[in-house]
Amino acid sequence: QVQLEESGGGLAQPGGSLRLSCAASGSPFAFYSMAWYRQAPGKQRELVALITGESTNYLDSVKGRFTISRDNAEKTVYLQMKNLKPEDTAVYYCNAVVITGTKYEYWGQGTQVTVSS
């Protein structure tokens, strides 16, 4: 059973920084991609950042402020968030995809990020 465990959320002031971590366990296969999504109250879940191999993609509103990275050996993905804004407030979810003929998608339980003065 694949499990994704997020950590690093919390309260930050506008302009501050937080670093999210997501540790994966239970998968005998390498992850094709890992990503961070977020969902703010009353809004749909949206893709924040995606890493596939060495390629990364970002939501336009976080470009230049957020950086996604992964440690394949540790099966961990990180999201470094800088210059945080109140509109970044949301529950952040880790996502991982395994492709072995069939696509399997896994989600973490989420970690709250609140940006407020």
Image (cartoon, rainbow, N blue to C red):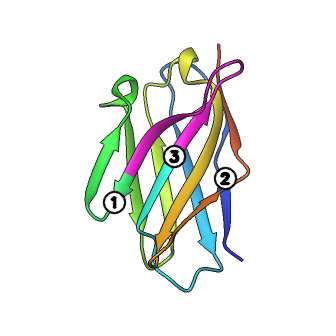
Q: Crowdedness of circle 2 by 10 Å Cα count: few (<14), some, many (20+)? A: some
Nearer the observer: mark 2 or 3; the answer is 3
Q: Amino acid at mark 3?
A: Trp
Q: Residue at x 41, y 68 (%)?
A: 32
Residue 55: quadrant of the picture:
bottom left
Question: Which badge, 2 or 3, is on the more N-terminal residue?
Answer: 2
Q: Secondary structure at mark 3?
A: strand
Q: Is residue 46 magenta?
A: yes
Find disc 1 in the rendering and name its residue. Answer: 52
Could you tell me how far apart the alpha carbons at marks 3 and 1 are, in whole angstroms? 12 Å
* Horizontal and vertical percent position of residue 13: 59, 21
Quarter containing the N terminus: bottom right
Question: Which badge, 3 or 1, is on the more N-terminal residue?
Answer: 3
Q: Nearer the viewer, residue 29 or 91?
A: 29
Find disc 3 in the rendering and name its residue. Answer: 36
Q: Residue at x 39, y 29 (%)?
A: 62
